[in-house]
Image: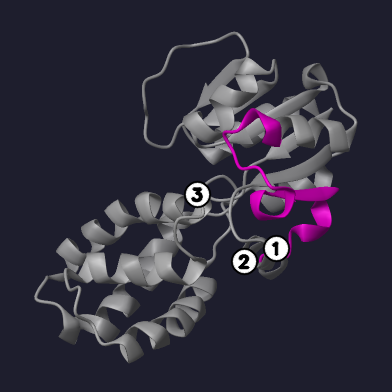
Amino acid sequence: MNILIDLDNTLLDERAGFKKYAPLIYKKYQKHTNLKYEEFADKWKDSLEPFYNQYLNGEISFHEQRISRLKYALGNSSIPNQVLNDFSDYYNHVYEDSWTLFDGWINYFSENTNNCYIITNGSSSQQRQKLSKLKIDKYFMELFISEEIGFRKPNPEFFNYVLNKTGSLASRSIVVGDSYENDILPSIKLGIKCIWINHKQEEYARNDYLLEVSSVSEAIKELEKIT
């Protein structure tokens, strides 16, 4: 059985990371905003997906999506260019230091006998760096990253590419992810069974190919039944 695992919010605990890096960013750039921290934090979270999707769609660069997020979260479009340019390096530092793995994964991977693969959207260098810094890259047969293969989730070509490269049938694969739109729905359409980590308790139609859980620990328990 091949286990195809998403990275962000599935292996990587982005909520825990945000609590580490967001206060540091606000403190450093507080003089450029009139917003209180809570307002800044809410705007930052609201900006994550829209600007990241613009990057994935090729509309803006990786650097541009970061500085656009800062300007939006601070509510200030007139931040000096030098400050914005320096922000990218600072963000790299605090963001990388915040990377945290959900509890339970190390034990699972240490005892797992299935073939595991990463399926993720994003920057090749950053996604690979996450796995390396978290010291879990050794547990994966191969990493499938949208920037490298030319397709991004939820494009079915992404999943067809993964199945072809792993030499696996859809019926012999399981996708584990947190995004219904990016991970789960396209997998179901291809006949791949899924474990959906529904962090936000979203409502979608149930399906025979779908096992819904509310936490990573529950997902790991279900995977252990397959091992």
> In which quadrant of the rendered view does residue 184 lie?
top right
Quadrant where the C terminus sits is: top right
139 vs 131: above or below: above
Q: Mark 2 points at which residue?
A: 126
- Residue at 69 percent of width and 15 percent of height: 191
Q: Mark 3 points at which residue?
A: 57
- Judged from this view, the residue extending furthest toward the bottom is 82
- Judged from this view, the residue extending furthest toward the left is 34
Q: Which of 143 and 108 is in front in this view?
A: 143
Q: How crowded is mark 2: few (under 14 residues within 10 Å), some or many (20 or more)?
A: few
Magenta-drawn segment: 134-158
Q: Give me the C-alpha separation between circle 2 and circle 1.
A: 5 Å
Q: Nearer the viewer, residue 44 or 85?
A: 85
Q: Give me the C-alpha separation between circle 3 and circle 1.
A: 20 Å
Q: Which of 87 and 138 is in front in this view?
A: 87
| Numbered label attached to residue 74 | none
- Image spot of residue 155 (x, y percent): 60, 33
Q: Tell me if 45 is positioned left or right of 2 in this view.
A: left
Q: Earlier in the sequence, mark 3 or mark 2?
A: 3
Question: Pointer 2 and pointer 1: residues touching (CB < 8 Å)?
Answer: yes
- Image spot of residue 52 (x, y percent): 44, 55
